[in-house]
Image: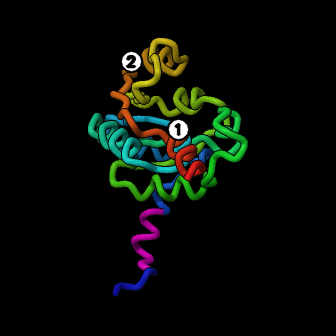
Amino acid sequence: MQAMTDLPALAALADKICARASVAARVARLPRPLVFTNGVFDVLHRGHVMYLSQARALGASLLVALNTDASARRLGKGEDRPLNNEADRAFVMAALASTTLVTWFEEDTPLHLIAEIKPDILVKGGDYDMAKLAETRVVEAYGGRALALPFVDGYSTTALVQRIRRA
């Protein structure tokens, strides 16, 4: 059995996680088109994996911006959410082949981050009305595209947490 201390693999994984202060410089070195998405991604499930794979297929790089723990708590998903802290959520997200880079945002929305890095494509889940998002207006103002990917029915972290608690 291979040792669990594969340092090069762990280093490569950690390299995909980027502090907010460094993200613009890191993004400048990524292949384009750059796809951007964001969310809590608290308990990763099949719906998330399918969504992120579809998002990555739209471009050469995928930046996933995670809500910090404080930002996630303000979303009203429950006082005990997120279940996994931001460092753990970033590590899991970085382990996905579809993800190129992972960072965080402290605000309620990633509007300032989007304006700073100017992704070519902004992607959200199909439960969002893209026309109502301020992020869409920012992306379209510099010539980018904003689109919603089809929602994967039957997969929701909130529903999964509720089901676990009932069991």
Furthest toward the front, the residue is 167
Query: Residue drawn 37% across and 22% down?
Result: 147
Task: Decide: few, some or many residues near mark 2? Use Cα within 10 Å; few <14, some 14-19, many ≥20.
Answer: few
Q: Earlier in the sequence, mark 2 or mark 1?
A: 1
Residue 121 location, x and y as percent? 37, 28
Q: Is residue 7 visible?
A: yes
Side of 72 where 118 appears, left or right: left
Q: Secondary structure at mark 1?
A: strand
The structure residue drawn at horizontal position 60% and vertical position 45%, both measured from the top left corner, is 20
Question: What is the spatial separation of the Cα atoms under label 2 and label 1, in whole angstroms?
Answer: 23 Å
Q: Which residues are magenta?
A: 5-13
Examine the rendering and report whether any part of residue 65 can be seen: no
Q: Which residue is mark 2?
A: 143
The image quarter containing residue 123 is top left
Q: Position of residue 5 (x, y in %)?
A: 45, 81
Q: Residue at x 40, y 22 (%)?
A: 146
Q: How is the image coloured?
A: rainbow
The quarter of the displayed image where residue 32 is located: top left
Question: Tag 2, which secondary structure?
Answer: loop
Please name the predominant secondary structure of the magenta segment in the image.
Answer: helix
Judge whether 36 appears above or below 13 on screen: above
Residue highlighted by disc 1: 39
Of badges 2 and 1, nearer the viewer stands: 1
Instruction: Name the image quarter holding the N terminus.
Output: bottom left
Q: Residue at x 49, y 62 (%)?
A: 14
Q: Is residue 7 magenta?
A: yes
Residue 48: where, in percent of width, then height? 41, 43
Image coordinates of residue 50 in percent, x first then y, are 33, 42
9 drawn magenta: yes
Q: Is residue 151 above or below residue 6?
A: above
